[in-house]
Amino acid sequence: MKKLILFAFALVVMVSCNEPAKQYTTSSPEIETIKTLHDYFKDSNYDGLKDLYAEDAQIFENSLEPTTVSDMIQQGKEGRKVVEGYDFPEGVKCEMITNDAGEKWVNSWAVWTGNIKGSETEIKVPIISRFLFKDGKIVKEYSYWDNLPSYNAFEELASDKLDKLDETLAEDK
């Protein structure tokens, strides 16, 4: 009888021991989606970008107010009209956290490099983002970066053009 009780107890202990869910990882399909997202931005593949987001995704880019995927893509297209050399030369670093509520969040950070068309000055901007996934799609994004390097590059380019204009006007006199 003791053996039967010990066997039953051992069986209960073995059955009740579940491996805890992995809450942190650096490799997952969601992480690959974020790396693809950065590649799509780099290549101006806006149709591909649409496929990564849920239709009703909320996107917070340097803002407390959400925007839509369509608006984000339109802003990206407008920005690319004045930028060239768009790249992430050091790649994109990612990690995924599954919180206690079961939500899957991918955190990413990268350094974007590029320059304003007509300028040789390279701009380097660190970007930090968080993405919430549901059913394999991005449903919420928070991305933040410092725009000051871009503003400084625009100011430098404008200053150079004004200096050249002043030179041309002085030669014409």
Image (cartoon, rainbow, N blue to C red):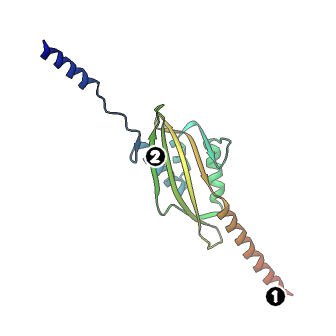
Q: Considering only vertical position in the picture, is 164 above or below 89?
A: below
Give the alpha-carbon distance from disc 1 to disc 2, as whole Å. 56 Å
Q: What residue is rendered at 87% in x and 87% in y? A: 173
Q: Where does label 2 land, which residue?
A: 33
Q: Considering only vertical position in the picture, is 123 above or below 3?
A: below
Q: What residue is rendered at 12% in x and 11% in y? A: 1
Please name whichever residue, 126 or 138, is drawn nearer the observer in this view of the structure: 126
Please name whichever residue, 19 or 148, is drawn nearer the observer in this view of the structure: 19
Q: Quadrant location of residue 16?
A: top left
Q: Considering only vertical position in the picture, is 149 above or below 135?
A: below
Query: Residue lying farthest right?
Result: 173
Q: Where does label 1 land, which residue?
A: 171
Q: What residue is rendered at 65% in x and 72% in y? A: 119
Of the residues shown, which amino acid type is indicated by label 1? Answer: Glu
Of the residues shown, which amino acid type is indicated by label 2? Answer: Thr
Question: Where residue 129 sits in the image (x, y, percent)?
Answer: 55, 49
Q: Quadrant location of residue 117?
A: bottom right
